[in-house]
Amino acid sequence: DDHLTVLGALALAGDVLITGKKDDVRILRTTPDGTAQILTVDLTKADLLLSPNFYLKQGDVVIVNPTRAKANSASVGTLDSFYLSAVSVIASVVSTIIVLLVK
């Protein structure tokens, strides 16, 4: 589409999740001279429709940053699962040794 907007791109992607920051959406754009630009748009403001960044250009990448709660919850799960796995392996080894000693 020649006239794809930020809202249209997000709709094609499945909309913004509740864990996405609607006031901090980034557009990564490469200029004709090869430099990269990071543009910020606020989907909660009505003046978005008048913004020069409302219409996307060829090669633009739209990024919706996660809310702080989502970002924090993502970093907790990996260590918790590692420790749970380690405790499970240790418990299995100890119970196997106990069974062998009792026989």
Image (spheres, grey):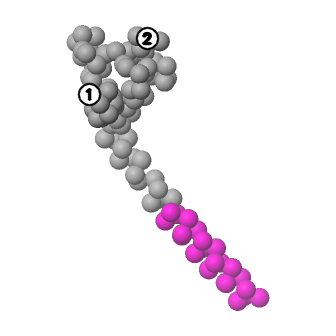
Residue 86 drawn above or below residue 80: below
Numbered label attached to residue 40: 1
**Percent position (x, y) of residue 100?**
73, 86
Q: Quadrant of residue 86?
A: bottom right
**Percent position (x, y) of residue 12?**
49, 19
Give the magenta part as a residue range.
Answer: 82-103
Residue pictured at 29% horizontal, 35% vertical: 35
Q: Given the image, on which type of amino acid does mark 1 rest?
A: Thr
Name the residue nearer the viewer: 32 or 48. Answer: 32
Q: Residue furthest right?
A: 103
Name the residue nearer the viewer: 79 or 40. Answer: 40
Q: Main secondary structure of the magenta part?
A: helix
Residue pictured at 32% horizontal, 27% vertical: 32
Would residue 90 appear left or right of 55 to someone viewing this image? right
Would residue 84 appear left or right of 62 to someone viewing this image? right
Name the residue nearer the viewer: 36 or 5. Answer: 36
Q: Quadrant of residue 62?
A: top left
- Mark 2 lies on a secondary structure that is loop
Q: Which residue is mark 2?
A: 2
Would residue 38 appear left or right of 90 to someone viewing this image? left
Would residue 103 appear left or right of 89 to someone viewing this image? right
Residue pictured at 67% horizontal, 84% vertical: 97
The crowding category of the residue bearing disc 1, from other C-alpha atoms within 10 Å (few below 14, some 14 to 19, many at least 20), is some
Asked if the residues shown at circle 2 and circle 1 are in contact, with their CB atoms under 8 angstroms apart, the answer is no
Nearest to N terminus: mark 2 or mark 1: 2
> Can see residue 25?
no
Residue pictured at 49% horizontal, 23% vertical: 14
> Can see residue 66?
yes
**Percent position (x, y) of residue 74?**
42, 47
